[in-house]
Image (cartoon, rainbow, N blue to C red):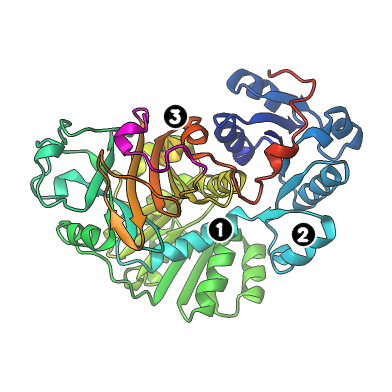
């Protein structure tokens, strides 16, 4: 598959990094020579220094031989035009990043008029994910699969009785559950039965929902209530806007703290169900005046990771039950789970996961990045054409770093062992280290039957260019 990514910001870089490890030939385009030089040094992709709206450059690239164009420049309008031009010149599919709330209300019209296959909005998707976390009964990492019957979550080992100092094979009361990985000092490791769990480990456990819930009851902190009535949002940017709008429509009492006067005026006009406070959200006295301790949730979504993390930690200390921070810097990902913030979400990871899922096809129901992309969790629907169908897991030859964590067969959740077999139509969850992503194609046949499934069949080759 050939993919053109236009825009080498954080999202463009992440996409190039993620897709290039999946047997996808990547061309990345940016108008900055400085950015292009950095990409040449760091990624094994073809780098083009140019503007994506230059038709002659697209023609020179033989854009008609490409399967997909992804436009993620800073300008919504530029992304829309790039995708439209690419499609007109013969590229088979196009994805545009469009973030302006005014466009968000007319996505269908924009897609049909400009011939764009899919539009992504990282800020809106992040707001949706934050709301999903708000109304869960657990404050941990939590991903559900098979319509909620299979759950993967994480726990601090020191808070689980009988875990620290013991080998996994000797643990009791983990029936219908599997430890897929361990976060040790910010690094993901794949354990086996002989692995010993250490005091500061964070263990990722997958299994039947009821079993996971029973394990969670042993967690040595009070679980927050799922009833959220009052929310304070630090930052009135796009994510703050989408959160304020959606939570207000749900009848939640919302306060947004934003220090830019012009932005406050805009929010006040657009969000009739939210109270907008114009002030410095890092001013503790201001937050106390706004009664932060009475809030059910505090969400930090400014453009500064440090502010988001610091103030969510402060909110936690004054008794706020749920605290959520937006982070963008990969360097923070490894330490977040040890800080005490309930959850930290990255718009880059959320959007990258969504695009990877689209590229792979409809058999991949969900893709989640773990610890900034060190690993992935994929939910897949088994297809008779997959080479693993009908084989025992012990006979599949899966490499170390790839684990089938759970199977749903005819509505029943199975935590597999070496004798377990995956049948056509089963849903199963695969944990995969980033270094092993290329094997997903070999074992699970991605891109079959999905929204981009025809891309391989119609591809005309890799063109005339060489990787940088």
Tag 2–tag 1 contact (CB < 8 Å) = no
Q: Residue at x 9, y 48 (%)?
A: 172
Q: Residues within 10 Å of mark 1 (few under 14, many from 20)?
A: some
Q: Give the CA distance from mark 2 to mark 3.
A: 35 Å
Q: Nearer the viewer, residue 311 or 55?
A: 55
Mark seen at residue 111: 2
Q: Which mark is residue 125?
A: 1
In this picture, which residue range is highlighted in magenta?
385-400
Where is residue 249? Give x, y as percent. Answer: 54, 79
In the image, residue 182 lies at what x, y percent? 27, 37
Gap between marks 1 and 3 measured at Cα: 27 Å
Q: Which residue is mark 3?
A: 436
Q: Is residue 188 visible?
A: no
Image point 23% across, 50% down: which residue? 177
- Of label 2 and label 3, which has the lower sequence position? 2
Q: Is residue 340 one of those drawn in magenta?
A: no
**Image location of residue 223, percent across then percent down:** 24, 64
**Farthest residue toward the right?**
56
Nearest the eye: 377 or 245? 377
Residue 365 versus residue 195 in the image, above or below: below
Residue drawn at the location 71% of the way across and 38% of the way down: 457
Secondary structure of the residue carrying numbered label 3: helix
Crowd around label 3: few <14 · some 14–19 · many ≥20 (10 Å): some
Q: Is 17 displayed left or right of 423 in the figure? A: right
Q: x%, y% of residue 217?
A: 17, 62
């Amino acid at each position: 598959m050939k993919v053109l990514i236009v825009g080498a910001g954080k999202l463009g870089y992440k996409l190039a990094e993620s897709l290039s490890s999946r047997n996808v030939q990547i061309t990345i385009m940016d108008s900055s020579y400085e950015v292009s030089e950095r990409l040449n040094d760091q990624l094994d992709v073809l780098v083009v220094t140019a503007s994506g709206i230059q038709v002659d450059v697209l023609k020179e690239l033989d854009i008609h031989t490409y399967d997909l164009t992804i436009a993620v420049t800073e300008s919504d309008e530029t992304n829309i035009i790039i995708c439209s031009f690419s499609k007109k010149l013969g590229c088979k599919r196009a994805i545009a990043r469009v973030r302006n709330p005014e466009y968000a209300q007319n996505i269908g019209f924009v897609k049909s008029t400009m011939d764009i296959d899919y539009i992504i909005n990282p800020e809106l998707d992040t707001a949706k994910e934050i709301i999903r976390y708000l109304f869960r009964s657990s404050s941990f990492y939590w991903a559900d699969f098979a319509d909620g019957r299979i759950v993967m979550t994480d726990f601090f080992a020191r808070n689980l009785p009988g875990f620290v100092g013991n080998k996994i094979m000797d643990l009791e009361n983990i029936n219908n559950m599997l430890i897929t990985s361990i976060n040790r000092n910010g690094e993901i490791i794949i354990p086996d039965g002989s692995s010993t769990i250490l005091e500061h480990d964070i263990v990722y456990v997958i299994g039947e929902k009821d079993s996971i819930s029973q394990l969670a009851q042993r967690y040595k902190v009070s679980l927050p209530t799922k009833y959220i009535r009052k929310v304070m949002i630090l930052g009135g940017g796009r994510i703050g806007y989408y959160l304020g709008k959606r939570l207000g429509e749900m009848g939640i009492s919302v306060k947004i703290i934003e220090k830019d006067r012009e932005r406050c005026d805009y929010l006040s006009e657009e969000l009739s169900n939210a109270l907008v406070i114009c002030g410095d959200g890092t001013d503790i006295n201001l937050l106390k005046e706004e009664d932060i301790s009475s809030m059910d949730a505090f969400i930090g979504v400014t453009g500064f990771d440090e502010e988001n993390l610091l103030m969510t930690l402060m909110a936690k200390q004054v008794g706020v039950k749920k605290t959520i921070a937006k982070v963008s810097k990969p360097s923070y990902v490894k330490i977040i789970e040890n800080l005490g913030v309930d959850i930290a979400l990255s718009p880059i990871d959320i959007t990258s996961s969504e695009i990877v899922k689209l590229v792979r096809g409809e058999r991949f129901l969900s893709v989640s990045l773990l610890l900034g992309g060190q690993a992935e969790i994929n939910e897949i629907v088994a297809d008779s054409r997959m080479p693993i169908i009908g084989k025992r897991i012990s006979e599949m030859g899966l490499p170390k770093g790839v684990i089938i964590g759970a199977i749903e067969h005819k509505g029943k959740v199975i935590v597999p062992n070496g004798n377990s077999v995956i049948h056509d139509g089963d849903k199963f969850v695969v944990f995969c280290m980033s270094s092993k992503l290329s094997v997903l194609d070999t074992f699970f046949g991605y891109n079959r039957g999905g929204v981009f499934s025809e891309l391989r069949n119609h591809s005309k080759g890799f063109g005339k260019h060489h990787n940088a």
